[in-house]
Image (cartoon, rainbow, N blue to C red):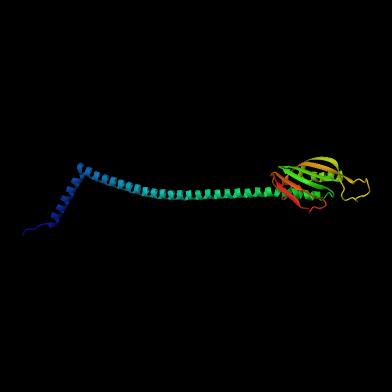
């Protein structure tokens, strides 16, 4: 009877296979090929990761660029709106300035007459014939039965907290017919005469010193009537 040792034969075969593999792996050529494969795989992985990361960075940069473009467009829109608002504000300021100038030019003559009416009423018997304003210069013409009244009127102008300044007073005497005196019907009787003092006062006018009065536009104002009757109509005309 023949006996076969199967265990030994399998072990011997396995041992022979391992030895063959060891021989193949241990050869220089096999090691070089294996090392090349490993290096190639690593190189492919690195290149792949670099390509993927570069693509991701490019995509992110594209998104940021789009965001920056959107922000730039919004900023440009805001700047345009700001320019439009500034233009509107400038137009409104110009209109306000024009309205102020218009009001100032309209308030000039009335402010002068108000200031004069206040001072004329302080001197009974003084007649103011005309008031002329050219720029910041005023010229008053009138008459009075007494020179002291002219002096009193000049003082009221001088002590006005700077409203009227640099006064120059010129006076002259003249005779006029006294219509209020009784008429003498006797032969050779002369008509009664009355001596009056004509005066011309020139001064500088500073409207900023008077509340509610402004403007230096050239104007001419004329007033007629006695000082004791301030309610008499006053005519105002612009140059």
Residue 131's spot in the image, x, y percent? 76, 45
Residue 4 percent coordinates (x, y): 9, 57
**Quarter of the rendering containing residue 8:** bottom left
Quadrant where the image shows the N terminus = bottom left
Q: Residue at x 74, y 50 (%)?
A: 235
Q: Is residue 162 visible?
A: no
In the rendering, at what x and y percent does residue 6 appear?
12, 57
Q: Is residue 8 left or right of residue 203?
A: left
Count of numbered badges drawn on the protein: 0
> For the point 45% across and 49% down, which residue is it?
73
In the image, farthest residue toward the front: 187
Whether residue 6 is visible: yes
Quadrant location of the C terminus in the rendered image: top right
**Residue 56 or 17: which is nearer the viewer?**
56
- Find the residue positioned furthest to the bottom: 1
Percent position of residue 139, x then y: 76, 42
Apparent side of residue 88 relative to residue 131 in the rendered image (left or right): left
Decide: is 8 above or below 217: below
Q: Nearer the viewer, residue 136 or 222?
A: 222
Residue in front for this viewpoint, 69 or 31: 69
Q: Looking at the image, which residue is at 30% across and 46% down?
A: 47
């Amino acid at each position: 009877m023949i006996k076969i040792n199967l265990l030994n034969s399998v072990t011997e075969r396995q041992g022979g296979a391992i030895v063959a593999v060891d021989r193949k792996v241990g050869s220089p050529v096999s090691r070089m090929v294996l090392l090349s494969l490993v290096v190639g795989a690593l190189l492919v992985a690195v290149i792949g990761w670099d390509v993927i990361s570069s693509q991701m960075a490019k995509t992110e940069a594209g998104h940021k660029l789009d965001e920056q473009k959107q922000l730039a467009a919004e900023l440009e829109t805001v700047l345009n709106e700001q320019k439009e608002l500034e233009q509107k504000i400038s137009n409104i300021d110009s209109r306000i300035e024009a309205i102020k100038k218009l009001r100032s030019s309209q308030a000039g003559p009335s402010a002068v007459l108000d200031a004069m009416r206040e001072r004329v009423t302080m001197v009974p018997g003084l007649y103011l014939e005309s008031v002329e304003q050219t720029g910041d210069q005023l010229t008053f013409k009138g008459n009075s039965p007494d020179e002291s009244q002219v002096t009193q009127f000049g003082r009221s102008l001088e002590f006005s907290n700077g409203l009227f300044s640099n006064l120059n007073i010129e006076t002259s005497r003249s005779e006029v017919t006294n219509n209020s005196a009784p008429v003498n019907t006797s032969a050779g009787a002369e008509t009664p005469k009355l001596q009056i003092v004509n005066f011309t006062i020139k001064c500088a006018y500073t409207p900023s010193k008077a509340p509610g009065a402004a403007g230096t536009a050239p104007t001419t104002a004329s007033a007629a009537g006695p000082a004791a009757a301030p309610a008499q109509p006053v005519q105002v005309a612009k140059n």
